[in-house]
């Protein structure tokens, strides 16, 4: 059962978190490139990137759920590396929900009103997206390296 849970956890992380990190990273430069006049296609692209972020963030809830189930099955729920990973995952989710997705929506509202997006807004969004991505990269490293691991890797 442990191998099945671990497999589902890893697949969920790849399938759910991967698209969010890529789409969120693409969003700020795509929003910056939308022309003020007749930018319907470009706005559609930005809207699609936001939708990918929103939908896959919802699917991404399965990653920590499967991770906790896997940790329980493996008997490592109290390990320091796992507790750190859980805290970093919660921080990443908080940044996504509190900063990245709302700022994407604000920029979309500006684009829908055919207003020019301020560069400072896209830079700030890129910063929060970078922090989100860095947190996920750190969690990934912790999941692979696992201090005290007995895998011998």
Image: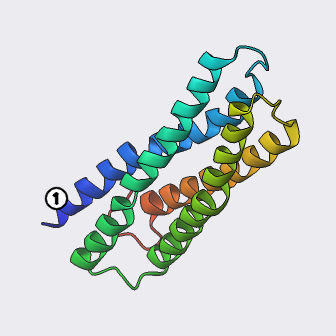
* Residue 97 at x, y percent in the picture: 57, 60
Q: Residue at x 36, y 43 (%)?
A: 15
Residue 138 against residue 108 in the figure, above or below: below
- In this rendering, would 99 be left or right of 18? right
Depth order, front residue of 30/71: 30
Residue 90 against residue 30 in the figure, above or below: below
Q: List the single residue furthest toward the top.
A: 38
Residue pointed to by mark 1 = 4
* Tally of numbered discs: 1
Depth order, front residue of 87/151: 87
**If the image is split into quadrants, where does the N terminus sit?**
bottom left
- In this rendering, would 87 be left or right of 99? left
Q: Residue at x 50, y 69 (%)?
A: 85
**Colour scheme of this structure image?**
rainbow
* Residue 153 at x, y percent in the picture: 39, 57
- In this rendering, would 77 be left or right of 45? left
Q: List the single residue furthest toward the front.
A: 113
Callout 1: 10 Å neighbours few (<14), some, many (20+)?
few
Q: Residue at x 27, y 69 (%)?
A: 70
Q: Secondary structure at mark 1?
A: helix
Depth order, front residue of 52/111: 111
Q: Residue at x 18, y 60 (%)?
A: 3
Q: List the single residue furthest toward the bottom.
A: 78
Quarter occupied by residue 149? bottom left
- In this rendering, would 19 be left or right of 62? right
* Residue 119 at x, y percent in the picture: 86, 36
* Residue 30 at x, y percent in the picture: 68, 27
């Amino acid at each position: 059962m442990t191998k099945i849970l671990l497999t589902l956890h890893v697949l969920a992380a790849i399938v759910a978190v991967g698209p969010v990190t890529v789409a969120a990273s693409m969003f700020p430069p795509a929003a910056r490139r939308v022309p003020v006049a007749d930018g319907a296609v470009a706005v559609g692209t930005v809207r699609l990137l936001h939708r990918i972020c929103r939908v896959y963030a919802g699917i991404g809830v399965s990653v920590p759920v499967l991770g906790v189930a896997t940790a329980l099955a493996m008997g490592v729920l109290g390990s320091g590396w796992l507790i750190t990973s859980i805290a970093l995952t919660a921080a990443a989710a908080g940044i996504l929900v509190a900063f990245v997705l709302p700022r994407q929506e604000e920029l979309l509202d500006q684009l829908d009103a055919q207003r020019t997006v301020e560069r400072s807004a896209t830079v700030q969004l890129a910063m929060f997206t970078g922090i989100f991505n860095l947190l996920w990269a750190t969690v990934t490293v912790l999941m692979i390296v696992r201090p005290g691991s007995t895998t011998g890797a």
